[in-house]
Each structure stands twice: as structure tokens, then as C-alpha cells.
Amino acid sequence: MSPFDVNALKELWQAVFLDSAQEIDRFFAHFYAPERTVALTDGGSLAAMAHLLPVGNLLLGEREHSCAMVYAVASDPALRGRGYGRCVTEQACLRAQALGYDAVVLHPASPPLFSFYESLGFTPFFSSCTVPLNRQSPATSGEVSLRRVPAKEYVQLRRAFLQGSVYIDFTPHALAYQEMLCGDAGGLFAAEQGGVPIGCAIIEGDGAGISVRELLCHKENFGTVSATLNRAFSSAKTIVVRAPEWAVPSGLGSSLPFGMLRSFTPLDIPRNAVKWYGPAFD
């Protein structure tokens, strides 16, 4: 695409998602590639766009399938109702298939969009639990610390906690982008007790409100890690954690649909497989 076209993509992004110029430039510098971008025009003007992100393979035990994330699906607000969102999503899937991907995934921005994407061949596949932490929870015994880690180390921590699950194996490049979204107060962290990792977390926020975009730990350590988060971000008004159902003690949060999958080849996924999406760059 020409520089003019890229500028049009950025303008549409700002009009739909209301991100700052800095945030938009950050995405285009990190992920943008013309061959992984689908754009539709109406009367010579940009009407809709979608991006394919090579975030990592879909792991099913010992098997790997190439996977792209469909991201930033957007249509011009003045042109909505004309089917451009549907068309650009379908074109993105066709592009992914042409590029050799086995599957695409996405995180619908709101619950009503699940039925929209189902009509395009996507299947609800990943779920998550959202848990607002009790800011008055008591401290737990045992010294646990949070250590900021680089993207390459976080990849290894994720793999250890997700072993045996069906999950998106985010690359260091993808996690480095997520790290940029985390703000000065956040980042990629290991929760350690006696120097041994008992959890890992992607933490995003400005200090006033903290969103833990991913918390991976064994269920018996959820309370300990939560207390550590409360202590580390004591000035935050709220801390909200997103975690797999298997990591959350019963009664703290219910599992809800989170991510969707459309495959272009049979994946042979076990019926009762435990599945996890991870960061959605949301």
C-alpha cells in the first residue's frame, strides 16, 4: 500500500477505536504488513479494514497448527449497515488461508458479536474467568514477589503453566507488543516464591485501575498470587484478573466465552480439551 493508504488506515482506526496517534503508530510499526491487511473501499474512500497478526501457533499437545489473529476489524461509521464488516472479515479469512495458515482466531469486542462471527464460520472456542480482586483480602504467609521478565522468558513461563492445554503459543514478538500496551505500571511478570515461579501475569494499567490480562497459576496458588498483586499495586482502586477456569477457585468467577476459532483444516481437538486464548490486545 502507498503511504496515503496507510494514513487512511490509521484515520479509520482512530475514528473507530479512538486510540491516540502514538498507540496507532505503535501498532503499525510492530505488526503492519500489506500482505496481511485487507481493505475495502467505497467510492475511492476506505470503507473497512482488518488485520492478520502472526501471534503464534495453536498448540494441541504435541501438534502445532499455524494460526493468525484477526484483529482491528473496523468499518467507517458513516458506512455501517452496508455489510462491509462482514465482507472484510470474510476476505481476511480467505487471505489467511491463501497465506497458508491452518486457522484464525479472534476475540469479539462485545458479547453480541459472537453470533455475528458464528455466521461467518467461527466457533466459540476459548473461555475465561474475570475476577475482581477483594482489595481487603488479608496477606498470606510465605514471601511471594513479582519480577518483571522479558518477553522470551515469559514465553517459557506460559508454556510451563499451559502444558497439556490447547492454547495460542504467543511469540516473543507478539508479547513484546502486549508489553508496550501495559503502560509504565504494568508489564510481563513472574510471581515467585523462594525463587521458584508459582505464576505468571500480564499486567496493564496506569496505577489507578489494574487489569491483569492473563494470570496463569495453579488453583491452590491463586489466593497467594492475588494477595501479592494487592500488595504490589496497593494504590490501585481496582484490580481485575482474567484467568483460565482451571486457575480460579470455585465461587470466585464464572467461565464465559472469550475467543473464537475458524479452522481451514481438520484440527482433531479432544472433546474435553482445556483451552486458553491469552492476551487479546484489548
Image: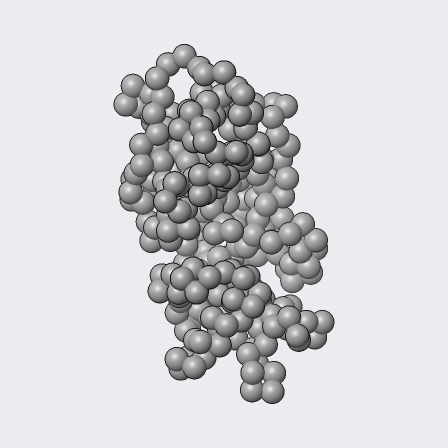
Count of numbered labels shown in the rendering: 0
The picture quadrant where one finds residue 15 is bottom right
- Residue at the spot x=64%, y=70% of the render? 77
- Residue at the spot x=39%, y=33% of the render? 200
Classify the position of the N terminus by image quarter: bottom left
Coloration mode: one colour
Nearest the eye: 13 or 97: 13
Q: Is residue 32 above or below residue 124?
A: below
x and y percentages locating residue 212 in the rendered image: 48, 38
x and y percentages locating residue 178 in the rendered image: 40, 49
x and y percentages locating residue 266 in the rendered image: 54, 54
Q: Is residue 68 above or below residue 90?
A: above
- Residue at the spot x=41%, y=54% of the render? 55
Classify residue 138 as left or right of residue 194: right
x and y percentages locating residue 247 in the rendered image: 51, 28
Q: Residue pushed farthest top? A: 141
- Residue at the spot x=45%, y=43% of the render? 205
Nearest the eye: 260 or 65: 260
